[in-house]
Amino acid sequence: MNIKSILLGASAAALAATGAQAADLPVAPEPVDYVRVCDAFGTGFFYIPGTETCLKIGGGVRVEFRFNDVLQDGGSAWDARTDESTRIRARGYLNFDSRTNTEYGLLRTYVAAWSTTDNAGGSDFYLDEAFIQLGGFVAGRTATYFQFYTGNNWGAVLDQGFADYGETNLFAYTAQFGNGFSASASVEVANKRGQIFYNGAQLATPASPTALQANIDGYGGHKIPDFVANLRVDQGWGSAQIMGALHHVYGRSLAATTLANGVAIGAGVPGKGKLGWAIGAGATFNLPMIAPGDNISLQATYSQGAIGYVNSAWDGVGGFSDASYNAVGGLKLSSAWGIGGGFTHFWTPAISSSLTASYTSLDQAVGGADIRDLNVQGNLVWRPVSGLQVGAELEYLNRNSNVVGGDADTLVGIFRVQRTF
């Protein structure tokens, strides 16, 4: 064997060994698009993979044990064997909040919904909010821009109607002036309304009802939305707002029918509608000098022909009127006003108490009943860990009316456990 053969053999062996070692090396993994934390909009947001959109998923579970009206005045819920005296309710919440910074400002979409089940079983589904925001523009379903203070208490059974007006469908724009000052204008569905009476009484049977008129509220179809505006300031000391709303009071044509008081009327056209309106002002003051988290709020409202902006418990079909037709004088507007406020105090970082009280007054046109509502609510809440609340609340309503049988006292109690994430 010559030297050349030896060298060729050694080279071949070295190449074979190198190939074997290369085969044993690990293969590089495919790149993984991990979820990234998005801290631009606060805690809980993350980037949707492959995009620059941040998303936050939240929700909660609320469970309540309710003691229904225990007072005799106005009819207790404990008198008859068929009364529902107690109720256990469970409700689940989900919300999705997506945000993207664009050259036109913040692009945001928000969806919140919940489902509830109680003694009767089954469940419902309710779309609470669903809106799109681009810069100062908002379109969709969210709280009316008339709303400011929503009460310090739960208002689980006896709604804090003087303050919490609920959500509605709208188009709105908000201009920011700096230093916490802003102005908003909104076009909203006209659903914060009472009824239209005839000679001070409810219509007992509808006149050829359509889907919009089947609740015999006396209104015609939805013609003109409500126009709402506010001026607001949010700063370290708290916040304040003045607000106003314009509302179209528009009745439908009447067929021959019978009023709730038994009076028969003939067919006819009620005539032209009128402009109802509402104004209000409120302020919230932070009180860290007493304890962190303490605050106090006040709000007052006045309305003619748009009573749902004074007390949302008066909108819909319930014997409360925005206006009443009179065979001689035409359409007359009802007037209403309300004032209320609340206070929250933290005894410790985990234990707090809240108290909310309001007084609302309604003078209904053309002989309709005058209503005076006094609403008081108080609770005690314990937060053993972050996101968990355990508490109890008492809610009281006193109603005085100038009609026979119109007075009532209502007292309910609620025990609640709620986990929010």
Image: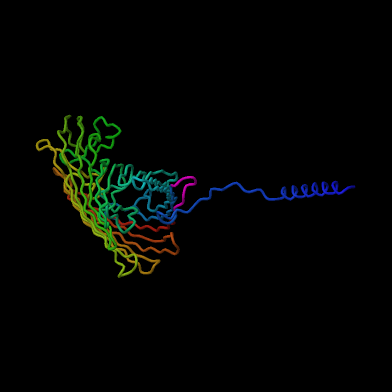
Percent from the top left, x then y, of residue 406? 22, 50
Q: Is residue 127 magenta?
A: no
Can I make out residue 400 in this image? no
The picture places residue 65, in percent across and down from the top left corner, at 41, 55
In front here: 372 or 52? 52
Most distant residue in the left direction: 328
Nearest the viewer among 67 and 182 is: 182
Q: Quadrant of the C terminus?
A: bottom left
Q: Nearer the viewer, residue 122 or 18?
A: 18
Q: Quadrant of residue 190?
A: top left
Against 112, residue 153 (above or below) is below
Which residue, as the protein is rendered here, is positioned at the far front? Answer: 3
Helix, strand or loop: magenta stretch:
loop
**Side of 32 relative to 153 (left or right):** right
Q: Quadrant of residue 292?
A: bottom left
**Front residue (pair 110, 104):** 104
Number of labelled discs?
A: 0
One can see residue 398 in this view = yes
Judged left or right of residue 31, residue 396 is left
Give, as a single range, the part of the protein colored magenta. 45-52
Residue 154 horizontal/vertical position (percent): 34, 56
Picture quarter containing residue 289? Answer: bottom left
Write the residue at 14% across / 38% down: 331
Q: Is residue 51 magenta?
A: yes
Protein image colouring: rainbow
Q: Residue furthest right?
A: 1
Seen at 20% across and 35% down, the residue is: 251
